[in-house]
């Protein structure tokens, strides 16, 4: 666990640095006198479309890499390892299929989004380079995780990508770009840029090997590879479709189209700030989980499951409380466009959904790296069957709050099923009394901070409210020994500062 904890901490620092840049970008997008709500919504929709393109185009090659990498590593010299070759070929074939489908269904997309989201139709073709860049980057990143380069890949995706976006935003706001047109076109190339950086690094470290000769490992496991890739690919695609479907429904049927989608996307971004520990823990734990399943080390798997649950629960509730406590005050104090106040209600339900998802630990990675990875596909179908019709119906009735409610309900059921499966099948349980204490601690710190400062507003009071919450919450977390990793981090800090 020390290796996972160390990589997770480093990755979390990098990811939060990226989120700081992301918050700056979000502010520049949403402040009064900057971009329009529709333009901000279009950028968010672009990223969601790219995510869906990648989800389809990868053809399960991510799962192939993290499931079978230990077998290639144990049986082949690195330069004779053909795993990355077939993964990249699979991704290229997948994206060709995506491009063909994108051309074939363009008329349908025009009919669905032409009325309320005309800007999306105007720049539709530029979604493809963004999706292609993300596909290549994610496959290279998954490989980088296996060779213990997760910190670098997180830096490229979380910091460099957002840094490039910051440059484009400033170029637009300062008049270097005379319109929104060059911004969105250059933005669509960002993932290709960071892919080139990661590829160059792997080549420099002699970790990138293309070998078209089929190895004995590939021949031995080819049937299992194809079966796993197809099921996990299907489950992942369904999961990502469910996660972003609400944006597309809003852009398609809401009266204000991309402007309303922009409000929803702001709430989604605030939710993503809560997920920084989840991204770093996934990056650091995937390879150890794959190795533990290979070695049948169930004790280690259960330990990773428990630690990931309590750590993510503590982090997600803390960040959720900080954001929600200051949401309305932040909109007014930083002169963000008034309409974005509507994102607070959306964030409430999306944030609760995120807490549930993170609080159940790395169940997706545990199932996907086990021999029961077919179950990932089954639960993906259940999630899609719940979320798609519910999101559409609730959006028609309730507006932008509809997809958030759909997410909360669907992801609660989805994670409950996966939690029950791991408990019944392997007797793995991520919760204990510390989980309950963590929830009570977050509630207590939230209400103390809320009632002390509820009648005050302004940047100074945002700081005082936040500091009060952090002191109360972290003090109780350490004192009550809620998370073993929190105690280890605190002891390390004490030694370094001489307490």
Image: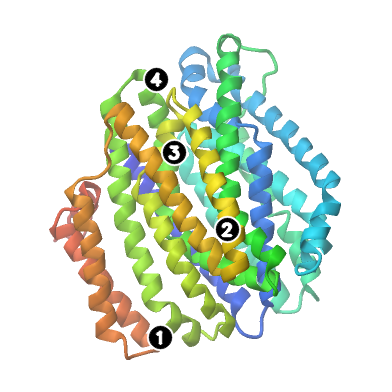
Write the residue at 28% across / 33% down.
Answer: 428
Numbered disc in front, either 3 or 2: 2
N-terminal-most mark, 3 or 4: 4
Instruction: Residue 239: give x, y in percent of width and height.
Output: 55, 44
**Residue holding disc 3:** 364
Left or right? Give the position of 168 relative to 119. Answer: left
**Residue holding disc 4:** 294
Left or right? Give the position of 62 relative to 419. Answer: right
N-terminal-most mark, 3 or 1: 3
Q: Quadrant of the N terminus?
A: top left
User: Alpha carbon of mark 1 to alpha carbon of mark 2: how far?
Assistant: 36 Å
Q: Looking at the picture, does residue 100 appear above or below residue 48? A: above
Residue 467 lies in quadrant: bottom left
User: Alpha carbon of mark 3 to alpha carbon of mark 2: how far?
Assistant: 23 Å
Task: Say whether marks 1 and 2 touch (CB < 8 Å).
Answer: no
N-terminal-most mark, 3 or 2: 3
- Is disc 3 placed on a helix, strand or loop? helix
Q: Looking at the picture, does residue 136 appear above or below residue 374? A: below
Task: Say whether marks 3 and 1 touch (CB < 8 Å).
Answer: no
Number of the label disc, if any, that sits on residue 391: 2
- Classify mark 4: residues with Cα within 10 Å, few (<14), some (14-19) or many (20+): some
N-terminal-most mark, 1 or 2: 2
Numbered disc in front, either 1 or 4: 4
Write the residue at 75% across / 31% down.
Answer: 93
Write the residue at 69% across / 29% down.
Answer: 90
**Residue holding disc 1:** 459
Task: Say whether marks 1 and 4 touch (CB < 8 Å).
Answer: no
The answer to whether residue 248 shows anywhere in this view is yes
Q: Nearer the viewer, residue 176 or 413?
A: 413
Residue 203 lies in quadrant: top right
Numbered disc in front, either 3 or 1: 3
- Is disc 1 placed on a helix, strand or loop? helix
């Amino acid at each position: 666990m020390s290796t996972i904890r160390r990589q997770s901490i480093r990755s979390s620092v990098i990811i939060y640095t990226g989120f700081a840049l992301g918050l700056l970008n979000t502010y520049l997008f949403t402040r009064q006198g900057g971009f329009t709500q529709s333009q901000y919504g279009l950028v968010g929709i672009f990223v969601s479309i790219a995510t869906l393109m990648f989800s389809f185009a990868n053809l399960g090659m991510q799962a192939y890499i993290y499931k079978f990498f230990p077998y290639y590593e144990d049986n082949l010299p690195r330069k004779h390892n053909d795993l990355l070759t077939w993964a990249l070929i699979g991704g290229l074939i997948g994206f060709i299929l995506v491009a063909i489908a994108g051309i074939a269904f363009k008329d349908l997309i025009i009919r669905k989004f032409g009325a309320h989201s005309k800007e999306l139709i105007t720049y539709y073709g530029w979604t493809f380079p963004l999706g292609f860049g993300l596909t290549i980057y994610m496959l290279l990143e998954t490989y980088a995780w296996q060779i213990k380069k997760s910190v670098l890949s997180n830096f490229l995706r979380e910091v460099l990508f957002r840094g490039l976006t910051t440059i484009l935003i400033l170029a637009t706001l300062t008049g270097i770009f005379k319109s929104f047109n060059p911004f969105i076109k250059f933005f669509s190339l960002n993932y290709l840029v960071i892919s080139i950086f990661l590829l160059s690094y792997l080549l420099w470290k002699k970790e990138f090997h293309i070998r078209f000769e089929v190895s004995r490992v590939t021949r031995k496991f080819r049937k299992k590879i194809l079966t796993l890739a197809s099921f996990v690919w299907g489950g992942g695609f369904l999961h990502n479709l469910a996660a972003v479907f609400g944006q597309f429904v809003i852009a398609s049927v809401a009266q204000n189209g991309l402007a309303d989608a922009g409000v929803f996307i702001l709430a989604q971004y605030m939710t993503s700030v809560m997920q920084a520990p989840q991204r770093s823990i996934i990056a650091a734990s995937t390879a150890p989980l794959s190795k533990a399943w290979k070695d049948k080390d169930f004790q280690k798997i259960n330990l990773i499951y428990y630690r990931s649950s309590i750590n993510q629960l503590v982090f997600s509730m803390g960040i959720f409380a900080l954001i929600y406590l200051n949401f309305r005050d932040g909109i007014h104090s930083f002169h963000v466009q008034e309409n974005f106040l509507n994102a607070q209600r959306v964030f409430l339900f999306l944030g609760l959904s995120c807490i549930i998802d993170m609080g159940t630990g790395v169940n997706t990675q545990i199932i996907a790296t086990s021999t029961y990875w077919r179950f990932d596909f089954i639960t993906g179908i259940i999630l899609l069957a719940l979320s798609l019709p519910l999101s559409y119906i609730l959006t028609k009735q309730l507006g932008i709050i509809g997809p958030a409610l759909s997410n909360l309900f669907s992801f609660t059921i989805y994670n409950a099923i996966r939690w029950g499966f791991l408990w019944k099948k392997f007797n793995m349980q991520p919760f204990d009394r510390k989980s309950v204490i963590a929830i009570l601690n977050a509630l207590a710190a939230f209400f103390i901070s809320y009632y002390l400062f509820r009648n005050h507003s302004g940047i100074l009071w945002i700081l005082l409210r936040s500091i009060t919450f952090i002191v109360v919450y972290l003090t109780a977390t350490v004192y009550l020994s809620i998370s073993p990793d929190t105690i280890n981090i605190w002891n390390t800090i004490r030694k370094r500062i001489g307490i």
